[in-house]
Amino acid sequence: MIGSSPMQYELRFQSLFDSRCGYAFPCDSRGRVDLNELSDRARIKYLFARAVVGRELAAPEVQPIGMRM
């Protein structure tokens, strides 16, 4: 498609307790996050989010940027 930009995605971790809370990180269409592209602060939050899946956060979902739950 001429003139269209590539689709961008984010990996979203939704809180199990508050639907208004969660984390989102840029990723590819398969949900892979490039840790080298994240800031130090974002990297720490990403690693935290992965560590608490099932206890505080739901399993992550890949979504096109701009699409909200």
Image (tube, helix red, strand yellow):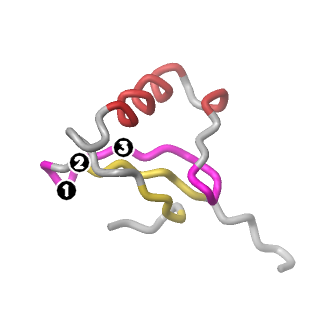
- Tag 1's secondary structure? loop
Three-letter code for the amino acid on which mark 2 is drawn? Ser
Q: Which residues are magenta?
A: 17-31
**What amino acid is found at the position of numbered circle 3 in the picture?**
Tyr
Find the distance from the CA under tag 2 to the CA under tag 1. Answer: 6 Å
Which label is found at residue 55? none
Residue located beneath label 2 in the image: 15
Count of numbered labels shown in the rendering: 3
Could you tell me residue 62's position as x and y percent? 50, 59
Judge whether residue 22 is colored magenta.
Answer: yes
Residue 11, position as x, y percentages in the image: 48, 51
Query: Which residue matches tag 1?
Result: 19
Q: Real-space Cα distance between discs 3 and 2?
A: 8 Å
Image position, residue 61 (x, y; %): 43, 58
Horizontal arrangement in the rendering, residue 54 relative to residue 51 (left or right): left
Mark 2 element type: loop
Q: Nearer the viewer, residue 16 or 55?
A: 55
Badge 1 local density, few (<14 within 10 Å), some, or many (20+)? few
**From what the image shows, is residue 41 above or below residue 15?**
above
Residue 39 in the figure: left or right of residue 3: left
Res 33 quadrant in image: top right
Q: Are marks 2 and 1 in contact (CB under 8 Å)?
A: yes
For the point 56% across and 52% down, which residue is it? 31
* Marker disc for residue 23: 3
- Against 47, residue 62 (above or below) is below
Say which residue appears at 58% left-offset and 30% top-offset: 38
